[in-house]
Image: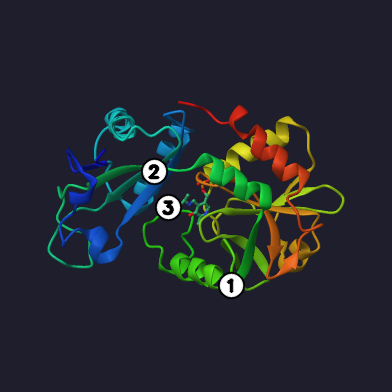
Amino acid sequence: MSRIAYVNGRYVPRAAACVHVEDRGYQFADGVYEVCEVRDGRLVDERRHMDRLVRSLGELRIPLPMPLRALSVVLHEVVRRNRIGYGLAYLQVTRGVARRDHAFPPAGTRPSLVVTATGLDAAKADAMAAEGVAVITFPDNRWDRVDIKAIALLPNVLAKQAAREHGAREAWYVDRDGHVTEGASSNAWIVTRDGKVITRPAEFGILRGITRAVVLEAIRAQGLALEERPFTVAEALAAREAFLTSATQLVMPVVRIDGHPIGDGTPGPLATALRRGFHGYAAFT
Ligand code: PDD
């Protein structure tokens, strides 16, 4: 079955899907994106992802390419046409196609919209969660608007590559004060020896992860001890558990940081339980 992508008003074979060379996404990384989990063919937390998309676009003054209801139809249609049971939907909006000039293009330039959907192997993801993953720490060298889900991800690319070269799955950014900010494509969490769940507050400095928000709800609903505050690398190394969250990895236990085992070096019970219970708190709308 050939895969289908949506590009600026048309459903096209993914292998042939392309944008103009003067698209500002291509020229300047001038755009934003969203990644939504697809489960049983349904989009997980679509509303929250769309709310964040609207916010990211607003911060960059890029118009919404079409009304949200129409965008939702396109998302569902791409998932349907690709017959995705489990996987992800990817949506990207750029400031559109215009003669190369750093400043904004003329008013009325239409934003570009691309939507794709990719099937993932749920069993493989669960097997990885059963093992836990390794992370490395990496200096946070990004701009200070990482709350915008911008497609400009070069620092994230370099951090992730460094992780891979160290046999790790993720890189945890560390700010100048020695605090962990977040992962290259996920949010970062620890559980202290006395059972408190710690994650950095979602002000500027991290992306306001949708998975993070759902996990926070789960933690509060279960009455678990929670502190939204920055934590240091030393605290992480001394933690009972660590884990990361993202739409594609859900709750993923972290068992090693910079080669040091966390807790007993196996996935922690809290991270494992939060992963198992995640979809009880997520919204299928
Ligand atoms: N990444 N922080 C960063 C830097 C991210 O790129 C992501 C998501 C997250 C987690 O956000 P959410 O829970 O909404 O997925 C945090 C996506 C999955 C990606 O780039 O593929």
* Residue nearest the viewer, comparing 57 with 235: 235
Instruction: Give left or right: position of 151 versus 246.
Output: left
Q: Earlier in the sequence, mark 2 or mark 1?
A: 2
- Front disc: 3 or 1: 1
Q: Is mark 3 within 8 Å of ligand 1?
A: yes
The answer to whether mark 2 and mark 1 are in CB contact below 8 A is no
Distance from Cα at disc 2 to Cα at disc 1 = 33 Å
Residue 216, position as x, y percentages in the image: 65, 39
Distance from Cα at disc 2 to Cα at disc 3 = 8 Å
Viewer can see residue 230: no
Q: Quadrant of residue 113?
A: top left
The answer to whether mark 2 and mark 3 are in CB contact below 8 A is yes
Identify the coloring. rainbow
Q: Please name the amino acid that badge 2 sits on.
A: Leu
Q: Please name the amino acid that badge 1 sits on.
A: His
Viewer can see residue 192: yes
Distance from Cα at disc 3 to Cα at disc 1 = 26 Å
* Residue nearest the viewer, comparing 63 with 254: 254
Which residue does the image show at 54% across and 46% down from the upper left?
124
Q: Which residue is mark 3?
A: 149
Which residue does the image show at 29% across and 43% down from the upper left?
115
Residue 118, position as x, y percentages in the image: 37, 43
Q: Which residue is mark 2?
A: 53
Residue 69, position as x, y percentages in the image: 31, 27
Q: Which residue is mark 1?
A: 166
Residue 234 to residue 31: above or below: below
